[in-house]
Amino acid sequence: MPAEPRRIITIDGPAGAGKTSVSRRAAGALSVAYLDTGAMFRALAVRLGRGGHELPEPAIDAALAAMAFSLDGSGSDTRLLVDGEPLPESARTEDVGSMASKLAVLPVVRARLKLAQQALGRTTDLLAEGRDMGTAVFPDAPCKFFLDASAEVRAARRVGQLAALGRPADYEAILTAIRSRDDQDRNRAEAPLRPAPDARIIDTSDMTEDAVVAAIVAAARGASRHA
Ligand code: DC
């Protein structure tokens, strides 16, 4: 008998919309594994180093072919491993995000990572978070979300997060970086950032994180009851 299809929930949205913390918590509440696909693009950016997007395509393809992605644990404790190792904290900076965004334009990168993401989705029930989860990677997922917030709100949140870590942050510089990454992610030819036609759009600008998690968990539970 063919295996039951896995339960997939997708969350897409621009940088700084709060996807990562919301997705991790929602995955815990829904008892599914959590996949941060941005971390896969960041891992490649770290491996190739600065200017990696300008390397010849076969070199990028070979680097990707040599990377093994796996998930360890479940729910909010799920960890993405690359060659058995978690992503270093240093991969979380805006600088690496911008390098990842430049790599994400390349068809060879999108094709390889899409296959790796779909393979992970066959191993476990999954909440997958990124830019094109609902549109390109898991178009048949029964439950899709798109989290949005204005660039100004997202920049102010980032400044708050950095301040909480005791790190000084320049609001204008962060706003400019967010706008430039938005522009790159929304206007690329392949799998651009946009809501799937059947995604629930949640504008998080005036919502607390708790409220966003609650809205996602309630809608996902409702969708699985009606599936
Ligand atoms: O979510 P993040 O900031 O960690 O993502 C880093 C970059 O990776 C993002 O700017 C664009 C790219 N990305 C993508 O193109 N598709 C995804 N599904 C996830 C990330």
Image (cartoon, helix red, strand yellow):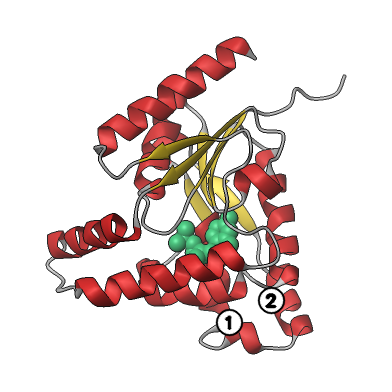
Q: Quadrant of residue 102?
A: bottom right
Kindly identify the residue that appears in the image at 38 percent across and 26 percent down: 215
| CA gap, disc 1 and disc 2 | 8 Å
Q: Which mark is residue 63?
A: 2
Q: Is the distance from the Cβ of mark 1 to the nearest ligand 1 atom less than 8 Å?
A: no
Q: Quadrant of residue 120?
A: top right
On-image quarter of the N terminus: top right
Kindly identify the residue that appears in the image at 58 percent across and 82 percent down: 48
Q: Secondary structure at mark 1?
A: helix
- Disc 1 residue type? Leu
Disc nearer the start of the sequence (1/2): 1
Between residues 120 and 207, which one lies in front from this camera angle? 207
Q: Is residue 214 above or below residue 16?
A: above
Pointer 2 local density, CA inside 10 Å: few below 14, some 14–19, many at least 20: few
Direction from residue 181 to residue 7 in the image, left or right:
right
Q: Is residue 28 above or below residue 106?
A: above
What residue sits right under mark 1 in the picture?
48
Between residues 65 and 220, which one lies in front from this camera angle? 220
Pointer 1 local density, CA inside 10 Å: few below 14, some 14–19, many at least 20: some
Q: Would residue 106 be seen by someone viewing this image from the given angle?
A: yes
Between residues 46 and 215, which one lies in front from this camera angle? 215
Residue 224 position within the rendered picture, expressed as x and y whole percent measured from the top left: 58, 17
Residue 62 position within the rendered picture, expressed as x and y whole percent measured from the top left: 75, 77
Q: Would residue 86 be seen by someone viewing this image from the given angle?
A: no
Direction from residue 18 to residue 49 in the image, left or right:
right
Q: Secondary structure at mark 2?
A: helix
Kindly identify the residue that appears in the image at 72 percent across and 34 percent down: 140
Q: Which mark is residue 122?
A: none
Residue 87 position within the rendered picture, expressed as x and y whole percent measured from the top left: 46, 63
Q: Is residue 21 above or below residue 4?
A: below
On-image quarter of the C terminus: top right
